[in-house]
Image (spheres, rainbow, N blue to C red):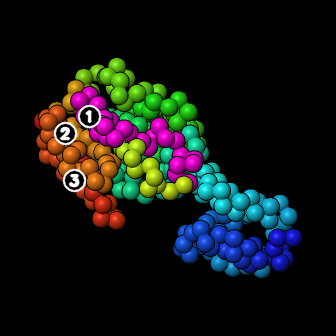
Amino acid sequence: MFVQNNSIRAAKAYMQDRLNEQFSASELRQMIRESICVRLNLSPSEYLLCDDQLLSESDLLFLRSIVKRLLNNEPFQYILGSTQFCDLEIKTDNRALIPRPETEELVQWVLMCFKDTKGLKILDVCAGSGCIALALKNAQPTWRLVGLDISSQAIDLANENAKALGLQVDFKVGDALERSSMEQFEEESIDCIVSNPPYIPASDREQMEKNVLMFEPDLALFVSDQDSLVFYRSIGVSAMKLLKPNGMVFFEIHEELGEKTIELMREIGFVNIELRKDLQGKNRMLKLQKP
């Protein structure tokens, strides 16, 4: 027996002991809480009072499996199979990147800028799990959302999320670097483009966490050192054709490449460019407008 007894208190102590060198105290508290609540279908208030509740053998084996997978550097969101994003439960697995909190900030910026506008058509480029498009559609049901991603597996995941959430988003396979994919839409037919494209230079790989490198898709993360802004250039050029006059683009960007990205967007012809920091104080988001 790997725990002292079958109580939740003992299971918590086991998880704490095995994982405390790998995670911060706050991370570990959150993961233990979510693991137990998901397994036993407990509410947050029920969790606070559950220490003496007894677990079945299969419950204990479930929690031990989580510990083993975490020790193998597997992301917790992949282990649980979902994560919260803008109050939506988004299914997560290695077909697409795990939605990040800073991307929620990008969504909120879009919603704030168009809060009183109905019936917009918005294109989400490099859609991944579909989290951005689905969050926008959930907040603004009259908007028409289209999501584009080169990975057919990511599009499958996005469609699964849309179905589970009951949200109508048109997800399509398409390459942001191919003009034919980007320009399959009518000229000046889109009100807004939003994108969190790959932007990490390959040389940054050594600085990244093992759980990202081992499990999340390289295709959605990395670009060459020689042309780290390749996605912004391609999306920006196509956006000038696809957007209606005064249409907007919202990008998530590399924190160290803000000025270079702004310079590129000015060269393409965008105006009213605004750089915004995320809650951690990093240059993370860019808004620009077609004249």
Q: Is residue 107 above or below residue 25?
A: above
What residue is disc 1 on? 233
What residue is disc 3 on? 275
Is 119 on the left-hand or right-hand side of 94? left
Is 283 on the left-hand or right-hand side of 161? left
For the residues labelled 1 and 2, say whether their Cβ atoms are less than 8 Å apart. Answer: yes
Residue 238 colored in magenta in the image: yes
**Going from the N terminus, do you reach mark 1 or mark 2 first?**
1
Is any part of residue 30 visible from this angle? no
Task: Decide whether the magenta segment is chiefly helix, strand or loop.
Answer: helix
Q: Is residue 209 above or below residue 10?
A: above
Q: Please report the residue visible at 37 percent of the width from the left and 45 percent of the height from the top.
A: 201
Q: Which residues are magenta?
A: 211-239
Q: Secondary structure at mark 2?
A: helix
**Going from the N terminus, do you reach mark 2 or mark 3 first?**
2
Label 3 – label 1 distance at C-alpha: 17 Å
What residue is disc 2 on? 264
**Going from the N terminus, do you reach mark 3 or mark 1 first?**
1
Q: Is residue 48 above or below residue 165?
A: below
The amino acid type found where label 3 is placed reads: Leu
Is 61 on the left-hand or right-hand side of 112? right
